[in-house]
Amino acid sequence: MAIREKVFDVIISCFKRHGAEVIDTPVFELKETLTGKYGEDSKLIYDLKDQGGELLSLRYDLTVPFARYLAMNKLTNIKRYHIAKVYRRDNPAMTRGRYREFYQCDFDIAGQFDPMIPDAECLKIMCEILSSLQIGDFLVKVNDRRILDGMFAICGVPDSKFRTICSSVDKLDKVSWEEVKNEMVGEKGLTPEVADHIGDYVQQHGGVSLVEQLLQDPKLSQNKQALEGLEDLKLLFEYLTLFGIADKISFDLSLARGLDYYTGVIYEAVLLQTPVRPGEEPLGVGSVAAGGRYDGLVGMFDPKGRKVPCVGLSIGVERIFSIVEQRLEALEEKVRTTETQVLVASAQKRLLEERLKLVSELWDAGIKAELLYKKNPKLLNQLQYCEEAGIPLVAIIGGCPKRRPCGRNQKENKPGPLHLLS
Amino acid sequence: MAIREKVFDVIISCFKRHGAEVIDTPVFELKETLTGKYGEDSKLIYDLKDQGGELLSLRYDLTVPFARYLAMNKLTNIKRYHIAKVYRRDNPAMTRGRYREFYQCDFDIAGQFDPMIPDAECLKIMCEILSSLQIGDFLVKVNDRRILDGMFAICGVPDSKFRTICSSVDKLDKVSWEEVKNEMVGEKGLTPEVADHIGDYVQQHGGVSLVEQLLQDPKLSQNKQALEGLEDLKLLFEYLTLFGIADKISFDLSLARGLDYYTGVIYEAVLLQTPVRPGEEPLGVGSVAAGGRYDGLVGMFDPKGRKVPCVGLSIGVERIFSIVEQRLEALEEKVRTTETQVLVASAQKRLLEERLKLVSELWDAGIKAELLYKKNPKLLNQLQYCEEAGIPLVAIIGGCPKRRPCGRNQKENKPGPLHLLS
């Protein structure tokens, strides 16, 4: 928890720096609210038992509850963050920070605005947070659902297979193109020619120059959706340059993202492992933040279907917690779990009253203070407690007998002057 | 949420001032963990649907999960706080801050210590928090389960009826003694004499002098349990005097507390309503914090039944939220929901690039800044946004044409000097 709080502090102060307010929604939603929003993953939703009343499910992410909240409260314009736990009946993988109950840290901007300004801010926020956390070098992959869809269309993928081919493409960060191609042809029924055509595109990544190049692509630029996506990406790169983060961003045609609700720009931040041999490309070790634009989701909850365009990001804090924890373990750095500034101790017996009075004065003065809950604790035990808990100061109550000012074996005595040792 | 965060800040900083670390437990527990801990209220527990795997329930409070956590991790010594939501299938009462999902803020001290020192600290924490929150005058009622049990024994209540008679006594803060007596005699089968005997005790409240008086009570002082409870309360009052809070504490023999797991001192803080006529006693308007000692609960989760004595408190924040909210409404005080310090604005068109560059510089410098997501927002709209959001500063980018330094109707122009208006 001590590590978590440090990570949350970095994230929350960034969200606040960007003017977000915080909202909260219940841990459960009506079951029907979650139905049909997560594709295949819907089977991972936790349901509550029917004990009478509404049928409820535990939230699966914070995006769908946010969209439901906007529609229900008829909000058309909000910039909010939400840090809370979500629930998935998945196979846990503790070392990789994958649990059935885990935190999500979401920031979203809802409202009708000029293109790419809020989208660019989301990417800026990701970069600010990942830099502040000092968890190593990272790269943000960017793509656009409209470019993907346009690309599928011109390659000859039937409309009905867009989403499933999208899922295949999304695996390219884990498996080779050959395997993805086999899946497309063998399992999903594309011809090898169509698959190869997709392969020519999705194996490309680069900066704004790749955007420019694809804008010149005779086929792709003829597709309305793809053209819109490419033009928006070009504008996005302009803003990212002004924000000083263009060098962190890679336009990556293989980025597809699993969730159904994205409609425009999508992005995913990956940590880079320092290459073993010089000259090798840095290796991605997994996603730590992701997000995108979802302009249709709020409309699904509005009785009149009124749309509220949204763009947002989610920080994968559980993974970050394990990275920070492993780093601290490697450094053998001990993390304090309390913030106590002073231990009120006594060097002699029968000074409980004085200790209680002093610790109370310290509390009333806003100082973080503790005492041992013993009538007559040994000084050594009190100092050991300081050592273990990392308490920097000890206030020792005790007096010296007249004849032997600092000698050993001093008799029990009335309280004397206060000693503060650091 | 803005109000909640303010209240949490007060509570968390007090918990930290007293040297507590923070822990977290999952929102669900094994169903069997919660079974048999809450008496009649167990029917209010939310269960999860059986989707294969363990049978789970949503936590009902934070105390039982804490005890389970201690036993599972074999911890015998910890001072922790935990702020999280708990779940009860109850009838909500929105105006009184009663919901099915609500926050609890718990602080507990677990471990074998000298008597009444941690108990006194819990009461000190309650008083510190309620004073800091400035929600009005309050009183903390204190009693001890051992005194109640001893009293029932000497009055002639059979052992098997202790808990149910306890429940009747607990109603004395809401209904008259006559009604409670009727319940004891009519529904619970006590003789009128036994009930009257109880009535003589439970209608008493006072300070340490009442403790002294009952220590002289020929019957009560002969009961071992009651005597232990009274002697501990006497010691408690000594410590509370040293902590400077004895005047806030009332020894109240009618305080019984609903939960089964308390074994020693119990307490409950109530807000006092200023009496309408001078001379009248202040009226309690409801409990805002409560707690007590539960020395047997951890042992229930330990395979060998090893006990870990615990004492703790819980702040009823939902009620406090509604009180603070009502007070702010009455004062017509507007609460800012964001912390933005500067809005980056422009007085002319075509300055989006400059706005993006400046806002990015501010973010990088750790300054909380926003801009409107429009290419060419009107100055009036930008200033209005500041007004509505309570943003104290605006940085206006724009230049003056050469001939008309500050005139109206100035033409669009290249960016000029930066104006900061507060």
Image (spheres, coloured by chain):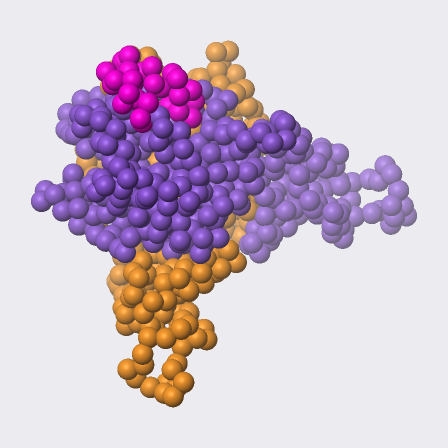
Chain colours: A orange, B purple
Horizontal side of A140 relative to B259 (left or right) equals: right
For residue B394, side relative to residue A20 (left or right)? right
Q: Residue at image x 9%, y 44%?
A: B304
The quarter holding residue A342 reads bottom left
Q: Nearer the viewer, residue A5 or A164?
A: A5
Q: Does residue B30 appear left or right of residue B127 in this picture?
A: left
For the C terminus of chain A, the quadrant is bottom left
Q: Quadrant of residue B296?
A: top left
Q: Position of residue A16 (x, y in %)?
A: 53, 44
Which residue is painted at 47% across and 29% down in the image? B286
Q: Residue furthest right?
A: B403
The structure residue drawn at horizontal position 45% and vertical position 73%, both measured from the top left corner, is A418
Dominant secondary structure, magenta? helix
Spot occupied by residue A6 in the image (x, y as percentages of width and height): 40, 53
Outermost front residue: B218
Nearest the eye: B232 or A123: B232
Of all residues shown, which one is farthest toward the bottom? A403
Whole-percent x, y for residue A20 in the image: 54, 39
Residue A90 visible in image: yes
Query: Is residue A272 visible in the rendered structure shown here?
Result: no
* Magenta residues, start to end: B169-198
Q: Is residue A97 left or right of residue B362?
A: left
Image: B99 above or below A285? above
Query: Which of the two residues, A324 or A295, is positioned nearer the viewer here?
Result: A324
Q: Quadrant of residue B219?
A: top left
Does the magenta-highlighted stretch encompass residue B178? yes
Give x and y (percent) for residue B193: 28, 20
The residue sitting at 33% across, 86% down in the picture is A407
B2 in the magenta segment:
no
Work out whether B203 lies above or below B212.
above
